[in-house]
Amino acid sequence: MRAVFSRQALALLPLAFLILMALAPLARLLYEGGGGLSANLFFDDYLRWRLVWSLTQAAVTCVLALAIGLPLAWALARFAFPGRVLILRLLLLPFVMPTLVAALGVLALFGPHGVTGLNLQDTPWLLLYGNLFYNLPLVIRAACEALATVPASRLAAARTLGCTAWRAFWRVEWPVARPWLASALCLVFLYCFSGFGLALLLGGQRYATVEVEIYSLVAYELNLADAGALALLLLCLSGGVAFGYAWLERRLATPGKVEPLPPRPAATLAERTLLAGALVLLALFAAAPLLAVAGRALSAGVEAWAVLGEGDTLAALANTLRFSALALGAAAVLGLAHALAAQRWLWLRAAAFLPFVLSPVCVAFGLLLLYPGWSASLALLLGAYALLAYPFVAKSVAAALDGVPPQWPQAARTLGASAPRAFARVVWPLLQPAFRRGLAFAAATALGEFAVTLFLSRPEWTTLTTLIYQRLGRPGAASLDAALVLSSVLMLFAVSAFVIIEWPARRDRDSDHA
């Protein structure tokens, strides 16, 4: 009984935060706009096209990510080659890149003046490629972790009974990987369907998503009725996907350990060709945009790099670091409390994804409507940052808690340890790698936050993301070069935050598998 009450007490903090910072602002926006869904959403050709395209691009990205990511992950999981450990460690670096950096990287490759010479602007392929840059590593990571749970003895038995490698994959490996991939694809769909930054810069006028349309309706037309209705519809569709993800994630809990099949060198020509093709695809979708940004910035000239010494840049840099550090502290507390409380209730676990499924534009504008006296306050801005960052901590820690054998803390209690002492001595050391990993994603999210800053930031609170956006809005090649230089700096900060926080977690897990 005491454990139930403690979980309820822990749940109060994240639930109160979600209500005050997410649900209440959205409700206020819906109230101002008349509330409820409007028939215009289904009878207006323009809005219907935005909704259909948003669903289509998210679904197509899921299909492409599965088709490309699964064979790529199989090659990374089964073949040993120089640099394999480094690639696996850096696999999720694209996912922590700020959206403005990713968008500039895609444009540097396939924009009007891209290095490839292939101009995909004003086509749907530009946004789809940007989606794959962000989300393909998620599918690869999930598939690699799934393949690591396939016992080597089961595969050996299948091969002994005469199964080819292809047949062994479909009969032994695919059933194990399927729920992991379904879980990852739920996340991919959520990120693509409710994404804002990439769609704003890569979608153009015709291929902008619902999230961009909400931004236009609120910021330029003050059409709160249609914006609120679109946000409500977005919440209903994404909420079902988020609940399915939470259910799949809890189902994948594996407290025990298995002995995975160790990777081996590619022996035949077909295996070497598969491995080479996988590495080329990984470079094309994960590394090429980042290298394009860095390359364009390095070739921009001394005049472009002089932007780093300007007062606006130094102030934006200080604001970015200050806001991110403060938001990271709040995200750590909220995420840990939410994960610990969500072990008992599936609905609470799914509630951690509420910031992902809500429109950040609507939340930001709803905050201004709900708390007009706080509209220019730093607390409101930092609260919005923490709202977008803490789910990464909650998700990572909740998944780690699923893997803790329940008999371990029970044994500590039997030996006389109190509940806090059993948690500190037994459970917490097992959670630390996941906690650091969640902090790495939260830090990268705070560093690259863009959507809510457009609404809640004051002129003196300009961050690197808003400064880059301002530079992109100015005409001339000099402004573009300055934006590329600033994007390189932001990319460096995101990589540094990821490596500093997440690298020890990877090291711990590597030592566990040794």
Image: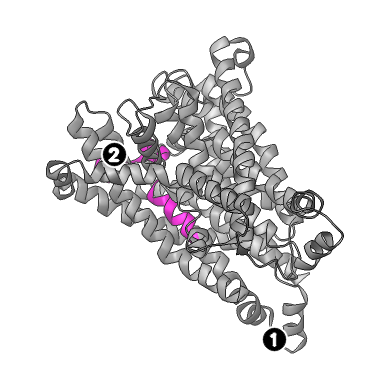
Closer to the camera: disc 2 or disc 1? Answer: 2
Residue 322 image position (x, y, % from top left): 32, 56
Q: Which residue is mark 1?
A: 417
Does residue 458 appear left or right of residue 411 in this picture?
Answer: left
- Above or below, 296 against 421 in this view is above
Q: In the image, 123: left or right of 458?
A: right
Q: SS of the residue at dot 2?
A: helix
- Main secondary structure along the magenta-highlighted residues: helix
Q: In the rendered image of this protein, does residue 96 appear above or below residue 450?
A: below
Q: Nearer the viewer, residue 279 or 143?
A: 279
Q: Amino acid at mark 1?
A: Ala
- In the picture, the disc for residue 468 is 2
Image quadrant for the N terminus? bottom right
Q: Which mark is residue 92?
A: none
Of mark 2 and mark 1, the one earlier in the sequence is 1
Quarter of the figure with residue 4: bottom right
Q: Residue furthest right?
A: 161
Q: How many badges with numbers are in the image? A: 2
Give, as a three-letter code, the residue at label 2: Ile
Q: Is residue 275 above or below residue 466?
A: below
Is 468 in front, or is 319? Answer: 468
Q: Secondary structure at mark 1?
A: loop
- Please tell me whether residue 448 belongs to the stretch shown in magenta: yes
Could you tell me if residue 23 is visible in this image? no
Residue 360 percent location from the top left of the image = 49, 37
Could you tell me which residue is drawn at 60 percent across and 52 percent down? Answer: 269
Which residues make up the magenta segment?
A: 439-463
Residue 132 spot, x, y in % from top left: 52, 39
